[in-house]
Amino acid sequence: MTTARRASLSACLPLVGALAALIAGEAPPLTGTSKTPPRIEAPNLEFDTDGSVIAPRGFVAHMGDKVLLGDALRYHQKHDDLYATGKVVLVLPGVRLHAERLGLHPQAESGEGWEVEAFIEHAGRRITIRAAHVHIDRTVLRFDGVRGIAGHGGVMSVSATSARVYLRDKPAEDRDGFERQVEGIELISPTIRAAGIPVFWLPYLYRDFYFDYPWTRYEGGKTRRMGYYVRAWLGTSLPEAFGWHSRIQARGDLYSQNGEGWGVRAAWRNANYGKGEVSWFEVPHEIVKGGPDDLQSIVTRRAAVFDAEQQLHAFGGALYARWVELPDADPPFGADPAEPWDERFRADYLRDDLEHRPFARRGVTATWGSSLGTVTLDTERRAHPDQPLTDRLWGVQVQVPRIQVAGPLHVGGSGWSESLENHLSDDAAVRTSFAGTASAMKWFGPLGVDLGGGVNGLAYQDAQLGGVEVDDELRMVPLATAGMRMRFVGDWGDGLSHVFTPRIGVELYQEGEGDVLSPWVFGDPRDRLDEDVHLFTTGFDTSIAGKHAQWRASAVARWAMRKRDRFYDDVVLGEQEADSALYDVVASLEGQPIATLRLSGSLSYDAQREDWRSFDVGTSWVTTRWMAVRYTGTLIPDTLTDEHHWQHRPGLTMIANRYRFDGDVTFRPGGDVVDQWLAQLTRRMVDGDLTLTYELVRAEDGHIYDRRFGVGFTMTIGGAPGADPGVGGR
């Protein structure tokens, strides 16, 4: 056959199989029952007497979304046999397969390969699987005689008796990159190795790539109070079931001064219904440190934390449930009932959890809402019997949104009934707070007028105060509001606009009617019912919007209208008169003057007591692609023993090609100049992240409470970067 003839055939290769079959005297297969045959491109094509197409000097074969190339090929369309040798590469969606020999059934989408090496790209890293044999199906690659699984060029590796790479039947529209095609990797009897040395063995391991989760993590170092330590985490994702993606993780700790600790954690997530997790961590023989220098051994005990949480959302409603079991507080806790609960155990061993979920809750909350309103059911108990908190045995809240009655007239209301018990004061009651309002708002050009009225109420039933039963109590307070506002809109050009809306008004709380309420102290604002107070209000809302800038700010100041409105009750001194007519101020600000800079702040000031309820400011600025700075400032309110003071925490992050540096410092009045500082250097490698950490923590009197040195390695084997191992759990 001439070269010209071969070239003309290679240009019409979808017909090559049919022509070959005709030459061999065989009928071509029915195209209605098979897929399009491979489209083969090659410099030389030949035909065997059995109808096979031969490419002896290199080829490229296109098979739908797959591409095959190599040194030599033989293909018989009727038998659906394709055999390739010599530097064969099969490119599948999400996977690239290299082999010395490869046999395929293109129509059946199956085949086999020998001496193979598979490459799976994920999040800038590469998973490599080397095996003696692979069986290819449409939705799975089965590897046997696996010699190694690792990020290409890394120090960590995994060997296994066999491996499976699961391919999606259809691309996942909600995924990006290779995850649109690759569902997961399953390993049978894997052994994890570091620099060729076996580290861990598991009977089974699965990763579904739904979570960017570091499933092996190591830390080691030294702290002042706990001595030398080594920590290890080992985890795996589990196969997907009914849309639920789950993972499990085991943990082991060893401390030279505190003993050993063990834990396990499982988590699950469903894109349509919610997520949950359960964890347990125990130190069987914890040596509790304390004393003047925090280094004396106070007691040896068994301490553990159990934490289960579930979030569900479906059918217009949501459910949140959590159950936490906490260990006893460190001695000598309990001398002062007002002392906050001791969180030293979680701060030492479960810092990540403490920072992300600071409140250990034990309760269930369910909410259902519609256009007519929202109903919430709730119950909450103390996570430990010694906690100075109030138990909510049950609670029901109903919230009715503003409903239009006629024209600008709207009505709305809310109610919250709950059964409460306080074990410290021996108080118990079914408390019901409610509010109903009717309001109207009308704009006359740029001028707006609003009027409102309603009633606030508070009731206590089935009550006992200090262990003594008391009669039911009910008190209601009528109220009225009115105000005027002016709306100013400015166009500053270049897509930048400004809206400014000042408002003045009044809030008139009348004298209450009904029973005189007992001095209930359940520890939340719903025990308070404002009455016989007339306030004048001033405030504004403003916003600036543009292509690159966004700003929003609001402020409301309330002023006493009568002299008797200046009087207030002080916890220690009794009734007192404020020095000025200013009652309180609430304000907030958030903005983004440029795309890389964010600013925020909020405050609440009690002008009568001249006391800050809260004051928080924060900013973050990405100065360049290599550096970001941040700052948070928090005003710590007054207590019975200390005046208010500021806590400042600036931070810095610098990112290089494979390095990242994070630094944070904390400043508080008193004590040392710097109360806490953290420096962390991370080196990103193909197989994971290596982290070096140093942290110094000082107590309020300035002496060193703890000093921590740490080194951690998070092994991902081709997974995306996970949580920084040095930040939490030291």
Image (cartoon, helix red, strand yellow):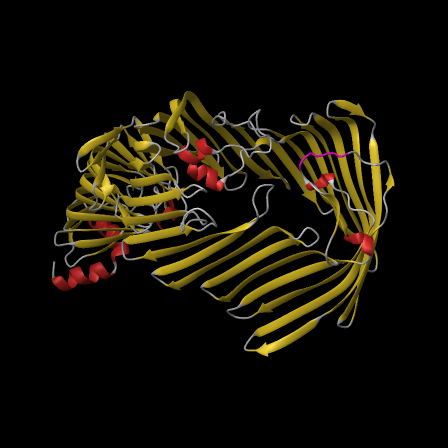
Residue 353 in magenta stretch: no
Residue 447, percent across and down? 77, 70
Front-most of 173 and 452?
Answer: 452
Front-most of 657 and 134?
Answer: 657
Residue 174, percent across and down? 45, 49
Q: In this view, does 583 lie to the left or right of 317?
A: right
- Quadrant location, the N terminus: bottom left
Residue 521 in magenta stretch: yes
Residue 106 can be seen, yes or no: no
Residue projecting furthest to the bottom: 493
- Quadrant location, the C terminus: top left
Does residue 276 lie above or below 176 as drawn? above
Residue drawn at point x = 11 percent, y = 61 percent:
2
Front-most of 548 and 511?
Answer: 511
Segment tinted magenta in the rendering:
519-523
Residue drawn at point x = 73 percent, y = 25 percent:
466
Residue 134 can be seen, yes or no: yes
Residue 583, percent across and down? 72, 55
Q: In this view, does 513 lie to the left or right of 712?
A: right
Q: In this view, does 152 lie to the left or right of 541?
A: left
Residue drawn at point x = 20 percent, y = 50 percent:
23
Residue projecting furthest to the front: 573
Quadrant position of residue 434:
top right
Q: Is residue 389 left or right of residue 435?
A: left
Quadrant position of residue 222:
top left
Does residue 598 lie above or below 467 as drawn? below
Q: How many labels does the image show?
A: 0
Residue 232, percent across and down? 31, 32
Q: Predominant secondary structure in magenta?
A: loop
